[in-house]
Amino acid sequence: MKITFILFISSCFLLINCAGNGESEYSFINSLTFYASFDDGFEADFANGDPNFYVAPTWSARNNPEIFSSDNEHFAIHKNEGRYSHALWVDNSWTPVYFYKAADNITYSDIDWSGTVSFWLKLTPDEDLPDGFSDPVQLTDSGWNDGALFVDFTDDEERIFRFAFFADRDVWDPELRDWDDVPFDERPMVEVKEPVFNRDEWTHVAFTFRNFNTGDSTGVADCYINGEYVGSLDEREQTITWNPENVAIWLGYNYRGYMDELAIFSKPLNEDEIYTIYSLEHPLSNLLP
């Protein structure tokens, strides 16, 4: 009887520990503020703010958008082509512009702001992208060089992938120089020169940021490809002044390729958490309550 009781108690502790470890492993989901799987259309699966996807004819006309809900020649849902299920296919130039509204979907703060952005891409950049710079994902309310977080591919013959963290223009570049006049080490970007993308497999991209909007030079942004750390931008003042109502999550700016599983979190995930997302055998939607 004693042995049976001891084995029963031991089994209970084992189950409790396993449950606790599982909760800890995926506890980052509690900081999710926005998530679009593109499995059930363009509307976000989870959103603290507006879940709708919008289109406007041009950047200058972005304040009068329309809800976009059906496929066209620029944006379409391709069935069974996703990282897990369906995927977003993009074949777009600089116009029209497509976006989610960021208010509440990004927990922006003008005091000590942090967060994480995660998504998957599938393309062969040198062969698939249109001419010119290409921005698959960009967060801003004004412009690429004035308070913006984004990733892009350069317009070089051999495309280079970059993570970009632009503070307010008068903070990072008070002289308002032409881009070509800005020395390389002053550019607020992290380059990934090795070819890591191809159209035959999905590539996971994530970046985290912390100590933004503190007013001092403690801002840090960490960058990840396929769950592995690839570089940081640190020891910079990262003051980003946004009007939350005007900020957008821009997708597919001059981009041709697939995109999937776009997720935004209100905290900077650690390296283990980033790797967990990369390693998931199921979509993030399986972790939602």
Image (cartoon, rainbow, N blue to C red):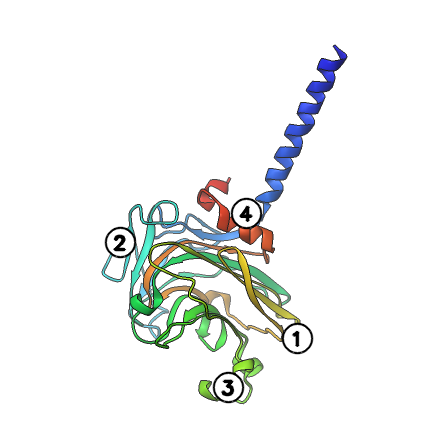
- State the image quarter where residue 8 is shown: top right
In x, y percent, where is residue 29?
A: 54, 47
User: In the rendered image, is residue 179 in sight?
Assistant: yes
Instruction: Report the amino acid beneath label 1.
Output: Ser
Instruction: Report the amino acid beneath label 4.
Output: Ile
Circle 1 packing at 10 Å, graded few (<14), some (14-19), many (20+), is: some
- Give the structural element (helix, strand or loop) at label 1: loop
- Give the structural element (helix, strand or loop) at label 3: loop
From the image, tell me which residue sits under label 2.
70
Label drawn at residue 122: none
Label drawn at residue 217: 1
- Would you place residue 204 above or below residue 132 in this image? above
Label whose residue precedes the other's in the sequence (2 or 4): 4
In x, y percent, where is residue 91?
A: 28, 63
Circle 3 packing at 10 Å, graded few (<14), some (14-19), many (20+), is: few
- Give the structural element (helix, strand or loop) at label 4: helix
Instruction: Report the amino acid beneath label 3.
Output: Val
Circle 2 packing at 10 Å, graded few (<14), some (14-19), many (20+), is: few
Label whose residue precedes the other's in the sequence (1 or 4): 4
Q: How many marks?
A: 4
- State the image quarter where residue 234 is shown: bottom right
- Name which residue lies at 36% across and 60% down: 198
Label whose residue precedes the other's in the sequence (2 or 3): 2
Instruction: Report the amino acid beneath label 2.
Output: Ser
In x, y percent, where is residue 149?
A: 49, 69
From the image, tell me which residue sits under label 4.
29
> Whole-Å distance between the Cαs marked 4 and 3?
39 Å
Label whose residue precedes the other's in the sequence (1 or 2): 2
> Whole-Å distance between the Cαs marked 2 and 4?
29 Å
Q: Which of pointers 1 and 3 indicates the residue nearer the eye? A: 3
From the image, tell me which residue sits under label 3.
182
- Would you place residue 215 above or below residue 178 in this image? above
